[in-house]
Image: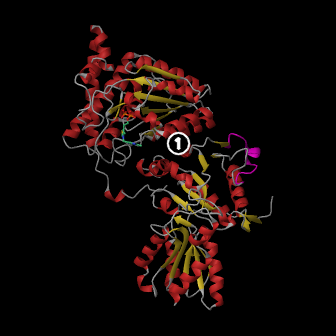
Amino acid sequence: MPDATQTLSYIQAVQHGLRWSLEALDDTVIFGEDVAVPGGPFGATKNLHRDFGDSRIFDTPISETAFLGMALGAAMTGLRPIAEIMYADFMFVAMDQLVNQIANTHYVSRGTYGAPLVIRTQQGYSSGSCAQHSHSIEAYIAHTPGLRLAVPSTADDAYQMLRAAIVSDDPVVVAEARMLYPTKGDVRLDAPVEPIGGGRITREGADVTIVAWSRMAAAALEAAEELAADGIDVEVVDPRWLAPLDFDLIAASVRKTGRLVIAHEANLTGGFGAEIAARAAEECFSDLRAPIARVGAPDVPTPAAPALQAVVIPSAADVVSAVRRVVR
Amino acid sequence: MSAVGDIVHMYREMRRIRAFEDRLMDLKAGGEVPGSMHLTNGQEAIAVGVASVLRPDDYVTATYRGHGWAISRGSDLTGLFAEVMARSGGVNGGRAGSPYFSDASINFLGENSIVGAGVPIAAGAALSAQRHGQGQVSVVAIGDGATNQGAVHEALNLAAALTLPMVLVVENNIYSEMVRIKDMTKIDQLAIRAEGYGIPGVTIDGNDPAVVAAAAADAVERARRGEGPTLIEAMTQRLVGHHSGDAQHYRPRGEVAEAALDEPLHRIRSAADATLLAELDAIDAEVTAEIEHAVAAARATELPDPNTAKDHVYA
Ligand SMILES: Cc1ncc(C[n+]2csc(CCOP(=O)(O)OP(=O)(O)O)c2C)c(N)n1
């Protein structure tokens, strides 16, 4: 028995979560491109094929539509598939299966069929990644009724939220953050499996609330440290799940601080930050002491050149200046 | 399971489908069916022939032209009428309507209103079947036009690569909505595409349920033996429009009348002797009574409760 809590990288935590699912649940099967013998393009499935064999984990053709549909058909008939979409950007190739098929199944059959499946993917930019390997797809997924969406930002969350996704009877997209894969943290390997949903206050503060997820959750904490030096006391909320969204947690924080900054890596127009801003305006209007501010990428495709990326990808510094705007 | 090639049994099943849809057209004219329907008139032999060789635990997935597939598998007529009539007694309580219903009680994974999208899903059911090791087979029906969808190509290749127990039935009714399939691809027989996936492909007479049953039996047995998918192209014609409101201006004069001489029910009747004809007439009368009973039962169910509109989005 390994130590209950281990320091692991985010990607190792994912690996542990997948291993847990194969051990704990007989009906889980893992498939996708390069996941079996190669151990996954990012190492998420390392050694799982060696330990569990072809019947539990296997490679598919490069056919996102076919294998997401296969995940649905398998889920409808008694398996609990975990399909890996290598880059979140490739989900768009299979959007029909995601939006028209998987998301609708439970509702349209009046609950007589379900789609208990997980789609694991990773999102966001990385150095030199081009416009087809940098999307943050959260708004597309969260917009679709019937889907659940996890955006873990720490190693422990990567493990706990993946397990929650696997035991959920709803279809769940787990959008990991590629840039966070090497980051380390303590992972509670034998924590009880949590239900899906639920955000977390990752830093308490009195002056302003920052809601940030995925890579920006870490950037927000960094920004908070910098602002603390100037006497600005920041509260950071990591919603962890965008569907179901723990809006009560956000609302409570906004009521306390009276100020709200939302930070995400996706571009701003129609981004999930707009949803949170709209709800805060509806539900917390009288608590707000300043206009809501959003941090996100400008509405441009992600360039490959690091020099250009530096201009468009939001950073901790952008969060700092947004906070300064609202506390002025 | 019914006997393969039992023509009287298959006649009854085809008549039930035909009568179900004819009755739906009346109900539509009377304002009792919202939305349009895609009828399978003339194509009944395909679903019935295939169903005759399936086990109850096999999976079936169809297109929006799927009434016949559900009925041939034993879906309850009252539930189907009520579904198309948008009533609470429908198999899906009116959430799916004519083009998108499913019936979990008979392993009918559902119709699909996205052309070609059912094939990947059927591959998933085949994956379950393979893993559960009980010899189940996953059958999926698509139209000729659907063979040009990427999803179909991807899923067939995947099913072949993984040796999944799947049978793809292409209901080639010559038209993809309003254009002829021969104007949309350069090949005369869609079944030859099977070769590209390394699986068997056959083109058969889809208006003879016994022929369909024989081809389906071969494919299903092959799948049960663990030898992978088969593509069956069943040639047929629809006697009606693409959907219930289609005036069919794109069809040459006389085409439908000629097809009516070759449709499966007419074929059986015109070859029957007096004794058989009497038997078939009796079947028709029984089916009419069954249909009326089901319509009355469907009508007796309430409209869906508006308070349930938000139920079942999540499990
Ligand atoms: C992806 C997609 N594209 C277009 C349509 C519109 N559409 C509905 S039925 C149809 C024709 C399909 O023809 P075929 O596959 O031959 O089936 P048939 O209707 O003849 O049974 C089309 C184009 C659709 N439903 N889905």
Return the x and y of residue B141 as percentages of the image width and height.
44, 32
Tell me: residue B272, above or below residue B171. above
Q: Does residue B238 appear to the left or right of A40 in the view shown? A: left
Q: Does residue A215 appear to the left or right of B25 in the view shown? A: right
- Tell me the quarter of the picture where residue B297 sits: top left
Tell me: residue A47, above or below residue A257. above
Return the x and y of residue B267 as percentages of the image width and height.
31, 15
Q: Quadrant of the N terminus of chain A?
A: bottom right
Return the x and y of residue A202 as percentages of the image width and height.
63, 77
Comparing B91 with A278, the one in front is: A278
The residue labelled by disc 1 is: A73
> Magenta residues, as a range?
A43-57
Q: Chain of mark 1?
A: A
Return the x and y of residue A143 as percentages of the image width and height.
45, 61
Is residue A113 magenta-colored?
no
Residue located at (42% from left, 78% from top): A281
Comparing A49 with A262, the one in front is: A262
Q: Secondary structure at mark 1?
A: helix
Report if residue A168 is visible in the image: no
- Tell me the quarter of the picture where residue A20 sits: bottom right
Is residue A55 magenta-colored?
yes
Comparing A86 with B185, the one in front is: B185
Disc 1 marks a residue whose amino acid type is Gly
